[in-house]
Amino acid sequence: MTTKLSVFCALTLLLAACRPAAQNIVPKQLRFAIPGDPPTFDPLVVNESNAGAIRDLTSGYLLRIDRVTDEPQPDLAESWQVKDGGRAIAFHLLKDLKFSDGSPLTADQVAQTLRRLATDAATTVGDAFREAHPEVSVSSPLDLEVHFRTSVPRLERLFDQFAIAPAKPAKLPGTAGPFFIAEFQPGAFVLLARNPNYWKRPLPRLDSIRIDIQSSHEIELTRFLRGEFQVIDRLEPDFFERIVRNQPGAARDLGASLDSEFLWFNQSDAKTLPDFKRAWFRSATFRHAISAAIHREDIISVVYKGHAHAAAGPISSANHAWFNTALQPLATDPQAALKSLEAEGFALRDKVLRDGTGHPVEFTLITNAGNTARETMLKLIKADLAKIGIDVKTVALDGRSLGTRIGRTLDYEAALQGFSNTDPDPVNEMNVWLSSKDMHFWRPNQPVPDTGWEKRIDELEDKQATEPSREARRKALDEFQQIVRDQEPVIYLVNPDYLVAISPLVKGMQPGVAPPQLWRSVEQISF
Amino acid sequence: MIRIRRAAILLLVAIALSGLFAGKLAPYPYDRQDRQAIDAPPDSKFVMGTDDVGRDRFSRLLWATGVSALLAPAAALCSIAIALMVSSLTALGRPALNYSIDGFTTICLSLPWIFLFIILRSELPLGTGAAAVIATTFGLMGVAGWPVPARVFTASIAEIRQSGWLMQARAAGISAPRIAIRYAWPHLRSLAMAQFYILIPAYVLAEASLGLLGLGVPDPIPSWGNLLVDLQHPDIVRANPWVLAPLGLLIIVMICLEILAPQKEVAL
Amino acid sequence: MKVRGKLMRGLAGAVLNLVPVVLIGGFLSAALVRYSPGFDVDENDWNPQISAATRAALHAERESENHLPSFYLNYLRAALHGNFGKSDHYKLPVSELLADRAGATLELVITGTLSGLLFGGVLAWFAVWPRRTILAVAAAGVSGLLLAIPPAVLALEFFQRDAWVEMALALAVVPRVFGSMRAILTEFAASSALLAARARGLGAFALAMRYVFRPALPRLATLAGVALVLAFGLAIPVESLCDVNGVGNLAWHAATARDLPLLCGLALIITSIVAVVQSLASLAGEPTTNP
């Protein structure tokens, strides 16, 4: 071998050997991963889960709604008073509050946050606040009032939706919560350090939290099993089972989540939809038949490995505050489905179901490519509907192409999707159920509701949004859920379980299915 | 060596025939689900076990062989043909033309082709039949895959243009087509075969990635590519090593093709 | 002198070719992104807690990207001053994102390419030089095996075993250069000059260096250029699956997010790199005799 060749080989090996040192475990530091970079640290524009995770760990709020009791609890505000029949609210802050950067957190800073929310349309968390037309006034360093044009039902809830942010914009802004953002390396990690000015001092118990950016769930699992991570949030069923096999003490099934998986038919006036198909999709009998033919128990056992519950309607059974307990999940009965279709003029001949005009019943069903659970559900649904003579062409599309078809062009026939509910209060889904809204995805932007039941749902949604009495709200929501069940514009399939992995070394974590799921008492977490 | 080559040919023929006659050889239809046997290990009923919705892996492997063994080489052939056509223009020896081809090839190498695939999927009606989607996918891969082989061919053609034997042939008055086919092509043939072999597994695997865009071979039709997606989950492989079967077949095919590749250049 | 002049002309031609290639390549890439479905859709469109007015305001922030020609012109103007815009997805300057990640990708790609060329060359050598059937078959077998294994899966296995991911990329490059290297070596090994030198009793190493490696250098240089471009393409799934914080991973996320400013910057830089690498490889492979 020539000298040159040897040198070249050595250089190659040297380059290859220049790897980052193995990451050491830091005492009193919790480590977990999020799948992507948080696009922002500004708590007022957070609208996705990665940034949401950072916000949950770092933010301070005026008050917080306890997700279990549904009652407001003080946070930065020591007390408050709703005045004038819900047209105003006065807050009295705790004394000596500071942001993590040492700047004072007084009524003026709170007022600046509220004014920004009131005027800046880019602050996505302030929608409901903005629509109430607030005016903020400061009477002392610890006192401020917010006045609204009209009475706002359940006024305190508005202030649980946004954190108080410092007025000065910064790359790594100061925070009022238990931790602050100490370091951010895009694509690598976010390091949160204990907030020395946290109002619940000497908490938090942890010194720091390191959040790695890890898009591969396979690698995240490997690192958890190696002890590099102590927590995995939202595990897929396959990975959950692997943790059960390898570290049974770490795997936790928290029961049915607030999330739901569902499918619906395009009932809009889209030109790409043939009239005869539109007629099928607008028939409640047709939708019920499809719903009855789908084997939900198989979806639970095959897709979710038993870690899911059959859905009974638009609100998950895990939502104890608002779920209509009279509803039961639909039983699978393909024979009954076929009979009801035959009563509507459909006929099964040579294993092909045809409508009254002779058209074979077939449609395309689209969902997100890369979502293993939904792609497997497509396979099961296709096979289930084939048993009653319906040919389903399944297509998995990339997320944005899917969004274009469903939300813009309406060029689709049926779609399989899911919601990750970030808030148990059903008022947050109003935009889906009001027939005039663009998010009324099966038939959006109706100037006037086309059916009696959609008109009734509009009325019930308005009522539950404005009704101060909890009992009256409950009654309206029960009726709403029953109508959705009777008409099935959306066929609810399952509520997946909330699956997490928590190392037995971690103490003080109180995970729950209601947000903020794992971080309810983050300041109490320790090793 | 002759015996080894014969064995390689026999193996390839056996694999091709098993794919062609999958309908007769497979014990089950490729889309039949047995929901009581999800991810089942191999047994007397399912010799290679079942997949995530209880479909027989062995049956799906046979059908997948018919799909991938035919279409991936066809797409590779298409890329090689286009690459040869484009690079052969450089044999004319016109600098401006050569620079244009060079630039065009560089642009094609740098474009994010994934978006062309996404646009293609959006133009295809959702109800487009599986055959049309598959043909479109492999066709587009064939059309998009020419720049890299073209680079290799262009360099070789430049070398050939300077060679002494070609100058002698031109001086002797032999026509350009005859020079190209009789004298130049044997020099390019082994390079073309090498590039052809490289493209086959690349297209098998790329087809699986295109599944993320709604293209590729649509479910429930199996292909080696979509069967190999499970390799990204080591736990599934450990639980059922037969998941590696399509990879094993692909390896055997590639080894056989490498063995059959023409080794010698024609002596002048 | 004639060779030097030819080289200077080649260099000048390459530089002149570079500018329109980069500009056209950048524009076409931007056009593919801009006119792909889903460009004007984002996660907020599926959030029922966000009102239509807020969603419209958020979409309005990307209004300038809707008219591609003016967007591209303004982008180029800013790029000439080193400003590659701000990523829609990461909300950070594109130049900062690229600078942070270039190192990881360069390390992965260069190490992978060089190692792949070295191993591929050694494998091709064993297939050709000793002239033994068993070695030729074995080399072909190794190449076929490596060709069939998905590079990303190879990288994942390496990662899981704490081995060098760069070597996984190298093993992915090997079969992609083996065939061409074998063809090149076969041609030169059968040349009359080498046969004559062997007859004169020249040693194996001197034969290899003088009559194979040196004359084959131009074509090997071209192959190296091709291998580098191939390696970058292979690096994208490797970085995605193994979470290497490199440009490939960035490109993948930018593509799924239809991040036009970031993708424009990537397109301009990648086209430039490919053009430069290809030009250098072509120049290195430029014949030194006149026709």
Image (tube, coloured by chain):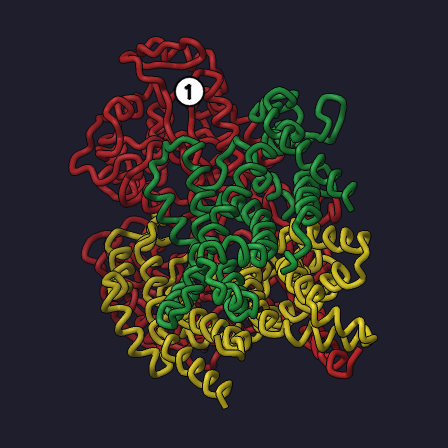
Chain colours: A red, B green, C yellow
Q: Which of C238 and A183 is in front in this view?
A: C238
Where's residue C64, x and y in %?
25, 66
Q: For the residue carrying disc 1, how many other residues have a C-alpha within 10 Å: few (<14), some (14-19), or many (20+)?
A: many
Secondary structure type for disc 1: loop
Q: Name the residue under label 1.
A: A390
Tell whether B33 sits left or right of B79.
right
Q: Nearer the viewer, residue A160 or A285?
A: A285
Tell whether A297 sits left or right of A402.
right
Q: Which amino acid does label 1 sit on?
A: Ile
Q: Quadrant of residue C158?
A: bottom right
Q: Which chain carries label 1?
A: A
Say if A45 sits above or below B76 in the image: below
Res A70 visible = no
Where's residue A119, x and y in %?
24, 66
Tell whether C188 sits left or right of A440.
right
Q: Which residue is at 80% across, 52% downward?
A: C133
Res A335 visible = yes
Where's residue B113, x and y in %?
42, 55
